[in-house]
Image (cartoon, grey):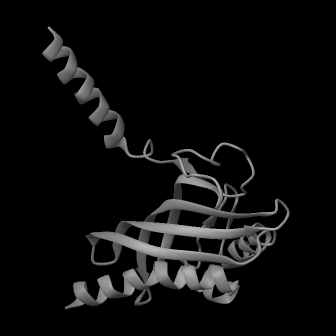
Amino acid sequence: MDRMESLAAIRQLPHRYGVAIDSRDMDMMVSLFAPDVRVGKGQSGRAALRAWYTKTMSTAGPSVHFIGNHVVDFDDADHAHGIVYCRDELDHPQDGEWVVGMLQYWDDYERIDGEWCFRRRKFHRLYINDALVRPQPGNGIDEGQSALTTYRLPDAYPSWARYWAEVAALEATAES
């Protein structure tokens, strides 16, 4: 029963994150993370996280984060990890663009004082570009415009390179 209740609580976290970021409810946002969450390389805690999100989101207008697939694996009774798919849209008024993107969050979850929270969120992006531009993998990722550190999909998967190496080996075997 605990595992089912834990899974339900963990699955609420990304949805609440989407509501918090889109409504710019920084109190809700920081409450979703561990009290001692690491922020960047030298800071920690919810106050530092709040300051980071406030600054990061201050250049964007309205946004929409649509949460999709969510896979959760338990490490033990109080720790889990998962992958969450997200389609995001953001108004970039300074650029005159409404951008659309696809991304994944690779999350670590921890139960602290009976409540599940994010321990860590790692951001991986497939693309982000103006809504009038046809999406392609990598669009908008390496342009240095985002305050968010992102990792390119599908290259972020360790299995991606292994798969293509296996394909190349099979093709080489077939040719010989």
Horizontal and vertical percent position of residue 76: 27, 72
Horizontal and vertical percent position of residue 96: 81, 63
- The front one of 150 and 100 is 100
Horizontal and vertical percent position of residue 47: 72, 78
The residue at the point 76 percent across, 70 percent down is: 60
User: Does 141 sit left or right of 57 as displayed?
Assistant: left
The residue at the point 29 percent across, 27 percent down is: 165
Residue at far right of view: 94
Q: Quadrant of residue 43?
A: bottom right
Asked if 104 appears above or below 64 in the picture, the reply is above
User: Does 176 sit left or right of 54 as displayed?
Assistant: left
User: Does 9 sit left or right of 42 as displayed?
Assistant: left
- The front one of 115 and 131 is 131
Quarter of the image with the N terminus in it: bottom left
The residue at the point 71 percent across, 55 percent down is: 146
Q: Quadrant of residue 131?
A: bottom right
Asked if 12 appears above or below 49 in the picture, the reply is below
Asked if 123 appears above or below 29 in the picture, the reply is above
Asked if 84 appears above or below 128 in the picture, the reply is below
Horizontal and vertical percent position of residue 166: 23, 29
Quarter of the image with the C terminus in it: top left
What is the tally of numbered marks visible in this picture? 0
